Amino acid sequence: MRIPYFTFLHLLDIAFFLILFIFLTFISVKAAKNSTKLLLSMVFASFLVTSFGAVLGLIVLEKYTKKAKLLEVKQRRVLINETLVLKGRVKNIGKFKINYCKLEIKLVNNGWGGGFKKGQLFKSGGFELFGSKNKEQKRPNVVKVTRYIITNGLLPGEIKNFSVVIPYPPYFKNTYLNYKLYCH
């Protein structure tokens, strides 16, 4: 697991919820007076609420401070080794440094519909109980891969090239390609 780069906003989020926890603990000590059980339950509840708020704040900040977009993505199928090569560029469009980016690629066979063979939508399962297996059923219809395309940081406004190789099964026809970029 890669650790995301924290901005000063992330540190402000952690500091705010830490101060809130200390404040709630102080109020709990005043309210509980001599009851240890009540004090422990109030401190535990304060810890849960502030921890949840801090983690939620970090997730939201991570999503909205680390922005990048893909530029000039081109694809080329290599028949000799049955792969698909994606090449392009990634640009940091946010105001903060990005630590790493990963690209999730989904290649779907018959992605635009049509081309269905007879019985492809409904297959009875009666004979499968007795060992009869359809060999076409074992072929996956979707190839989904995740690749890290930026691993050593991307400064604000900086552009870096990337290249990704994914498998392209030979039986795929009329494919649909979808990709999503996640940066942290």
Image (cartoon, helix red, strand yellow):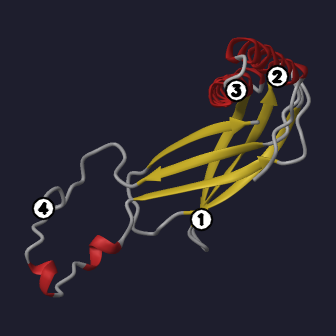
Residue appearing at x 72%, y 16% in the figure: 33
Please say if the residues under marks 2 and 4 sit with CB atoms less than 8 Å apart.
Answer: no
State the SS at label 3. Answer: helix
Residue on which disc 4 sits: 118
**Amino acid residing under circle 2:** Leu
Q: Nearer the viewer, mark 3 or mark 2?
A: 3
Residue appearing at x 57%, y 68% in the figure: 79
Q: CA distance from mark 2 to mark 4?
A: 62 Å
Q: Could you say where residue 51 lies in the image, as x and y percent from the top left?
A: 70, 29
Dot 1, crowdedness within 10 Å: few (<14), some or many (≥20)?
Answer: some
Nearer-N-terminus badge (3/4):
3
Residue 133 vs residue 51: left or right?
Answer: left
Residue appearing at x 45%, y 69% in the figure: 170
Q: Nearer the viewer, mark 3 or mark 1?
A: 3
Q: Could you say where residue 178 lies in the image, as x and y percent from the top left?
A: 51, 42
* Viewer-nearest residue: 79 or 110: 110
Q: Nearer the viewer, mark 2 or mark 4?
A: 2
Q: Could you say where residue 135 lies in the image, as x and y percent from the top left?
A: 27, 79
State the SS at label 2. Answer: helix
The numbered dot on residue 43 is 3
Relative vertical location of residue 10 with respect to residue 31 in this rendering, above or below: below
Residue 179 vs residue 130: left or right?
Answer: right
Residue 149 vs residue 124: left or right?
Answer: right
Q: CA distance from mark 2 to mark 1?
A: 50 Å
Nearer-N-terminus badge (1/4):
1
Residue on which disc 2 sits: 18
State the SS at label 4. Answer: loop
**Amino acid residing under circle 4:** Lys
Residue on which disc 1 sits: 83
* Viewer-nearest residue: 56 or 144: 56
Q: CA distance from mark 3 to mark 2?
A: 13 Å
**Amino acid residing under circle 3:** Val
